Image (spheres, rainbow, N blue to C red):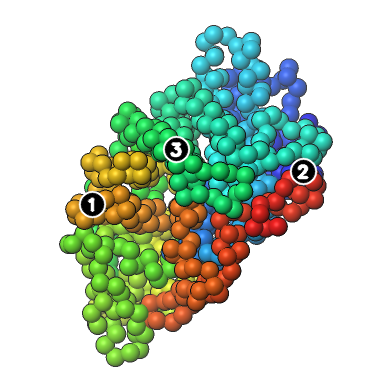
Amino acid sequence: MKKITSIISAFALVGLMLGAGSCTSDLLQQEPTTELGANAFWKTEDDATFALQGAYASVRPLFDRDYYLDGHGEYVRTRGISSTSGNLRLGDAYHDGNYNPSGYAGSFDKMYRYLYGGVNRTNYVIENVNRMLLTAKPESVAKLEAIVGEAKLLRGMVYFKLISMWGDVPYISKVINENAEVSNLTRLPIAQVKDSIMADFTYAYNKLPVKAVATGRAGKPAALAFRGKLQLYWASWNKFGWPELDTFKPTPAAATAAYTAAAADFKSVINDYGLTLFRNGEPGEIDSLGKADKLPNYFYLFMPVANNDPEIIMGFTHGGTGTGQGEELMRDFSGRSHEGSQLWVSPRYEIADRYQSTITGDFATKLIPMNPTTAGARTAANSAVNPNSYRNRDYRMKSTIMWDYEMSVGLAGLKSTGMVPYVYKTWNAAITIGGVPYTTYNTDGTNSGYVFRKFVRNYAGQGRADGDYNFPVMRLADVFLMYAEATNFVSGPQADAIALVNRVRRRGNLPALKADKTANADAFFAAIEQERIVELVAEGQRGFDIRRWRAQERIWGAPYGVGVWRIDSHGANMQQYFQNSSERVYQQNYIFRIPPGERDRNPNLTQNTPWL
């Protein structure tokens, strides 16, 4: 297999990361390491499994930092990324991306190329294992077909991401060996690519075992959940339109059919496989304000204790300490007081008001930003700097974010340094609370008044880049909410869908939805969106939701408007988005730019209209 250094150059990734623990720092200039002759490889089930592990290793870095993409929404700030160019293990696909709410869609050329590298890597497995099947012993057929099924699931996931961002894309279903094979490709209409993805997900569903054969692998529920999600997105594009993709013509009939099919797939995932929410969806214990010895169950859903839990229908594994394959969630989500982490991702101020009251089950009175130097600010009712303003809130709030005087476990040198209180703008300062001296949380990476607790380890023994949490790319709670969305758009609020949304709310110790929240389809959709915001925050979902629902204008105002300020808990303006932005700016937020470099090499690649 010859080295490829131009034209969708990431195709050279094929074969570079065959083992789950392998990596390289010079991805695009390396010869494939497992392109062995047929007499030496592709002979046994173990060969096929080894190659499949390489496909997982190549596809994982295309999804496991999607939390950066939450910066495209209104509730998460991604000020930068910890990944460094030239090392796929460290998220090179995300490098050079723009993670602001506006102007981002012209900066994901690397993601485009690396996604196609993932396509080629999965095609490599599919093609060769299919060849093995021609002469396989009967007792090996089912296992080999399941391996093809997993590779097709991964390929479908990659293409799903491609069409969600770029719309029409070239579709490649074979291993690429020469530049000439891709130098004249055209973009296939999104409907045809969608059908091919559907075929991959359906094959995977038919061939995969009910339960994954190993941690980090996929079973039938994963294939079915992704097939349902694809149909849900297809329904959304047909219902809300995608005018920026001028080759796509939405129809109400297609929307209804896709919502109906999506609901059927989600219902099967929910009912047919014995899956349940983490710790049965119970809220668990919660500590008093300012303490963190007892955290709710939702917090632990994002710790390694949940790695093999049925709620995580599909998660990408990481190696942990000493493997060179650890996740870097703590480095991205916490600050210097936690193993020298860097806080690249933080909550925006506005997320706090989304957490509802455990007493009323509805939104609490809005917080009031106040400078703590103002007399009485720390004790004023509803003051954002008064810790008591956060009392009796959705348990997911304490599990997800920290506000002034909330504690977390400080970590240094793989050891605990004891509890550190977070107080906005008092980095590494001496403070006394209740007669006990502390040193405050050392981080300057937030400009909102809050930091994340979600994904931040509360135990010692691992460095900032040594995590072994299986990052979820499909969770059961998401399936519950997607099912509710799909059925609601077809038939309005249904009793089973309402019950599922209430099960998600239960983990936050919230009461069931009141009647007015399920009175009609619009009210129930608002309740579903609310749960998606607080349940899935920082998991890479919000930006895609905003685009498929065409919600940019609803969130940020109409074009040529005054824009929207993001503020902090002290009342200071931080960033202003969409001020006097033209309609073209909004259009560009709905569809990504085809990389100019790819178009320079291939004149047959057309550009998306807003980027002409």
The answer to which of marks 1 and 3 sits earlier in the sequence is 3
Q: Nearer the viewer, residue 32 or 529?
A: 529
Q: Nearer the viewer, mark 1 or mark 3?
A: 3
Q: Nearer the viewer, residue 359 or 36?
A: 359
Residue 381 percent coordinates (x, y): 23, 79
Q: Amino acid at mark 2?
A: Asn
Residue 50 percent coordinates (x, y): 60, 28
- Asked if marks 2 and 1 touch (Cβ < 8 Å), the reply is no
Q: Which mark is residue 519?
A: 1
The answer to which of marks 2 and 3 sits earlier in the sequence is 3
In the picture provided, is 366 more to the left or to the right than 555?
left
Q: Quadrant of residue 436?
A: bottom left
Q: Secondary structure at mark 2?
A: loop
Q: Nearer the viewer, mark 2 or mark 3?
A: 3
- Asked if marks 1 and 3 touch (Cβ < 8 Å), the reply is no
Q: Secondary structure at mark 1?
A: loop
Which residue is drawn at the image coordinates 56% and 56% (left, top)? 590
Q: Which mark is residue 604?
A: 2
For disc 3, the marked residue is: 253
